[in-house]
Structures are given as structure tokens and as C-alpha cells.
Amino acid sequence: MDFLISGVQSVTIEQIIMYGVGIVLIYLAISKDFEPSLLLPMGFGAILVNLPLSGVLNQSLPGIGETHGIIEWMFQVGIEASEALPLLLFIGIGAMIDFGPLLATPKMLLFGAAAQFGIFFAISVAALLGFDLRDAASIGVIGAADGPTAILVSQILKSKYIGAIAVAAYSYMALVPIVQPFAIRLVTTKKERLIRMEYNPGNVSKKARIFFPVIVTVLAGFVAPASVSLVGFLMFGNLLRECGVLNSLSKTASDMLASLVTLLLGITISFSMKAEDFVSLSTLFIMGIGLLAFVFDTIGGVLFVKFLNLFSRKKINPMVGAAGISAFPMSARVVQKMGLKEDSTNHLLMHAIGANVSGQIGSVVAGGVILNLMAQYLS
């Protein structure tokens, strides 16, 4: 009984706050269906790592000595030592993606690049607010709208805010259906949202589908060498999908591997959600900067399309530019729903899908570019 009482008495206010954070994440996962495969294990892990003398963390016990906690071990092996979990997840993501709509309309690649503007805007804001450059760069990658990329970049740069960055990245990915419509309406008129686009996809050959992941990986290696692990694992997963001789492996990667790694990644990243690291004013700033990054990603994509329309005979619906973020396929669905709301006969889904899958490439290349820039600046 004395042991129980002493355990309860050792709980701090900060740990109680983290129990609340964990419960909120679990609620959003179950009740709101916001990224449940990741927010639920993150929420439960946030509670586990903040229990007094938690056995999931390394600790020294009287009469026993040093013990090893499973979550701390998984973090050290799966993220800190090798970034294995985020990279393995990219294989599954690549196996899910059909790049056909992008190959049919290659100009959509430009939208995936334009919609990364929020990353660099957020880095500037974070630096102005006094964050160390490593931390500012890590915080900015929240704008990639790509949780694994945000985790991997922040870990490579040794940011001390990896837990807050992971929570912000995945929370805002889940909130894309709320954040993006607001941002799109800020910079578009009803007339622009009513622009109709014909969809006449060209015939994408099997050879093109097979060569595409190889060519993208090679080009990324020359443009941003630090992105090779990110782009390479994503494209390797896509090559499994498109080669036609490894269908069972492709299905396993896109289904079981992706689901299992997502669960493990969620509960592993909770190691960075210990109260002493997470409960601070900096976390609130990170959440706010992350929101700005998402909003300006969307605005950047929309404004880029509006710029192209100044010189184009066939106008592009600016909402399609907003789908250039990496949140696949949520962003494309948002654009489709908004298009149908303005005009029930205006179907923008395939155009938006093309922009959305280009955002997958754009986000990982942007992460690699940031790593390269940081390596050069800090050397």
C-alpha cells in the first residue's frame, strides 16, 4: 500500500497533462477517425512513458540494477540508430501509390513542388521565434504533410522536439479536411473554384511505370543526395507494385507491412513525449508553426496554379494546386468534395490525385534538400 501511495504522490502536474494529451489523441483516433492507426498508439504510448518509474523506459531499480524498457529500446534501435521504422513505412506507402495519373499529366509534378512552400515559410518563422537552426528546420518539415519525413528529418538533425513535431505532423495530416478548405477559400473566388477541367489521360505503358521509380530515385540522388533513403524506399515500394512479378510482396507491403510499421512507429515515437520534454511553451509554438506551414503549403499550391493560368489558354482549377501536399489521398478528396459542392457535375478527382502523388515525391525531396542545406551550413 505504501508503494502505491508513493507512486501516486510522485506523479507531477506535467505528467497529468500528458495523460490528458494521450486521452485526447485516443479520442481523436476512435471517435473522429483521425489517423487512428497512428494517433491511437501515440496516445496510449504517451500515457505509458509518463507513468512513474515506467517499465517501458530504462531505469535503475534498487537491488536489481539497470533494466531496459521496451519503448526506449525500440526508439533507440528503430529510430535513433537507423531511422528504420520511418523508412520501412515508405516502402508500404510506395506500394500503395498509383503514379499513373501523374505520368498521364506530368505537369502535375510542378504542383507537388509548389505546395512545399509552407516548409520554408515555417523554417523562417521558427528561426525568427528563436529556435535553433536544427530545430527550426525540423519544425519546418511539419509542412511536408508527411509524418515519416518529419520524424526522419528531425531525428537526423537531432532536434530535441521530435515528439512535438511528430504529434503536430500527424495531427494536421488528420485535420486536412478542416484546414485545407479554409485556406483554399482564402485565396480563391467562386468563379475560380467553378473552373472545369477535362480529363483525357494518355496511355501510360508498363515500361513507363517501371522506369519512373528508377529515374526519380537517380534524379533525386543527384539533386538532393540526402533524400536517397527517403525517395529510394518510397520508389522501391512503387517498383514492387508496378513490376508485375511480385504481386504478393506488393500486397504485403501496402497492407500488412504498412499497418504493422505504422503501429510500431506510433508507440515508439511516444518515447519523445515524456512530460519533461513535451510540456513546454515551445510545444505550443511548434503546433502553431505547424498549422501555419499547412496553410501556406495549400496557399502556395493554389497561387502557383493562378500564376500559370495567367499564361495558359486552358485554365486549371486553382484548387488542384492545393492537392500538391503529401497528405495522400485526403487532400485529393478534399479538392474533389469542394469541386462538387460548387458544381455537382465538376469532377476534379483525377487531376487532384495527380497533384497529390506528386506531393509525395515533393515532400521527400524537400526533406532531402533541407538535410543537404543543413549539412552545408553547419559544416
Image (cartoon, rainbow, N blue to C red):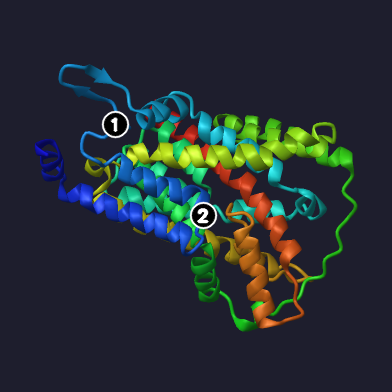
Give the number of callouts: 2
Identify the residue position indicated by label 1 in the image.
Answer: 55
Q: Nearer the viewer, mark 1 or mark 2?
A: 1
Find residue 198 and report its horizontal and vertical position in percent: 82, 70
Which is nearer the eye, 155 or 379? Answer: 155
Find residue 12 and report its horizontal and vertical position in percent: 15, 46
In this orientation, does residue 306 appear?
no
307 left or right of 196?
left
Sequence order check, earlier mark of 1 and 2 = 2
Find residue 204 and report its horizontal and vertical position in percent: 87, 48
What secondary structure is marked by label 1? loop
**Which residue appears farthest toward the front when viewing the image?**
1
Identified by mark 1, the residue type is: Gly
Identify the residue at image location x=80%, y=36%: 247
What secondary structure is marked by label 2? loop
Identify the residue at image location x=55%, y=43%: 366
Q: Quadrant of the C terminus?
A: top left
Q: Give the alpha-carbon distance from disc 1 to disc 2, as whole Å.
A: 27 Å
Find residue 14 and report its horizontal and vertical position in percent: 19, 49
- Where 205 falls versus 192 (above or below)? above
**Residue 212 image label:** none
- Where 343 falls versus 315 (above or below)? below
67 left or right of 311?
left
Give residue 303's quadrant in the image. bottom right
Which is nearer the eye, 69 or 376? Answer: 69
In this orientation, does residue 14 appear?
yes
Identify the residue position indicated by label 2 in the image.
Answer: 35
Q: Quadrant of the N terminus?
A: top left
Identified by mark 2, the residue type is: Glu
216 left or right of 121?
right
Which is nearer the eye, 187 or 96? Answer: 96
